[in-house]
Amino acid sequence: MNVQLGLETSEDISGSGQELMHNQNRTLHPPVPRSSLVSSMTSVLDGSDYHRSDHHLATSLHPGLGFGGDSPPASANSYTTLTPLQPLHDKFHHHQHHQCVPVGNVIGSFTLMREDRGLGPPSNFYSHYPKDISMGQSLSSLPSPNLTSMHSYGHHSGHLSNEKVVSSNGFDAHHHSMFSRIDQHFSRELSPPPSSGVGSPNNMHQHHYVHHRAEMNCRQNPPMPTQSTTLSGQLEEINTKDVAQRIIAELKRYSIPQAIFAERVLCRSQGTLSDLLRNPKPWSKLKSGRETFKRMWRWLQEPEFQRMAALSLQKERARANQSRKKSRS
DNA sequence: GATAATACATTC
DNA sequence: GAATGTATTATC
């Protein structure tokens, strides 16, 4: 059961979706004629604005996901602060045409789809990790719950519940079916969460819903070093071994090829990922390489549908680009 | 054939 | 020297 399949079918989404997303994340200028969708999306993403701000808040306050910056490993507990991934940033600029693209747009729609699930029983949302215990060591030791994120999330929910309907109508059958598939997948995958895992799955994750995507993908905007930076101090260290193991497990679980994950999520090559997964260096010995692990870690924090979206959508994008090239030539 | 692992080269 | 990419090889 390859999750990607569901998304892969939606060819056009990659194209229009991108622009849409672009707009949403930034100017909120809904592209074309998708009135209903647009409006709904806009309102949701409208969020984009608030999302952004919320996001900052959320991320910054998020114990495990503060992107504030790399604080001295020695300092704090066991948490890590996911930083802006700067090292990769420049590069992404050059490669924007393919993967590493912000998927925010589509994500928005996903948000709509998943809204009830994610919001409903937040407790179950991310607790499917059978062996999150390992992570627990470092990652699970999240200092605290993130009320802020939850709050912002709740905010969305209000929107979403309404939007959901709208989007369903607005979206074409194609997308609808796509989402359905994904939805199905998740209902299957997210199933019975042996919530033992990852720190406080219940607390975290939610806030990543919509806004997060951009960051998750390679060429996000540098996260505000504001609060996150400040708060990040207490969040350090990623247990690279655990992260590696979990990534391996997740990739297997969803039948995600290393190459795809490496390129889409980490913006790295398959070989690099393989090496990192097999020979994860201790956090303390990592330098710029921490960014890559942070991305992995972050990805692990994502709600599953978002994770898949990151992979699939970008994949779609790549495909779209390819087909475009073909058609041109 | 697709994916993963490895070796080596390159960049910073 | 660390991090990564590319090319190649191994594995399934």
Image (cartoon, coloured by chain):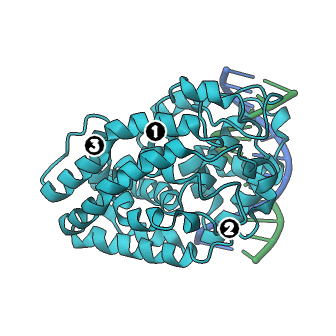
Chain colours: A cyan, B blue, C green
Label 1 to label 3: alpha-carbon separation: 13 Å
Amino acid under disc 3: Asp
Q: Is residue A217 visible from the viewing direction of this image? A: no
Residue found 45% across the figure and 78% down from its top: A184
Dot 1: element: helix
Drawn side of residue A118 relative to residue A179, left or right: right
**Label 1 Cα crowd, 10 Å radius (few <14 / some 14-19 / many 20+):** many
Residue found 70% across the figure and 50% down from its top: A273
Drawn side of residue A177 relative to residue A219, left or right: left
First-in-chain label (1 vs 3): 3
Q: Quadrant of the N terminus of chain A?
A: bottom right
Q: Which chain is disc 3 placed on? A: A
- Same-subunit check for callouts 1 and 3: yes
- Tag 2 residue: A195
Dot 3: element: helix
Foreground pick, A220 / A264: A220
Residue contact at pointers 2 and 1, CB within 8 angstroms: no
Q: Which chain is disc 1 placed on? A: A
Residue found 84% across the figure and 49% down from its top: A279
Amino acid under disc 1: His
First-in-chain label (2 vs 3): 3
Residue contact at pointers 1 and 3, CB within 8 angstroms: no
Tell me the number on the disc at residue A55: 1
Dot 2: element: loop
Q: Is residue A31 above or below residue A327?
A: above
- Tag 3 residue: A46
Amino acid under disc 2: Ser
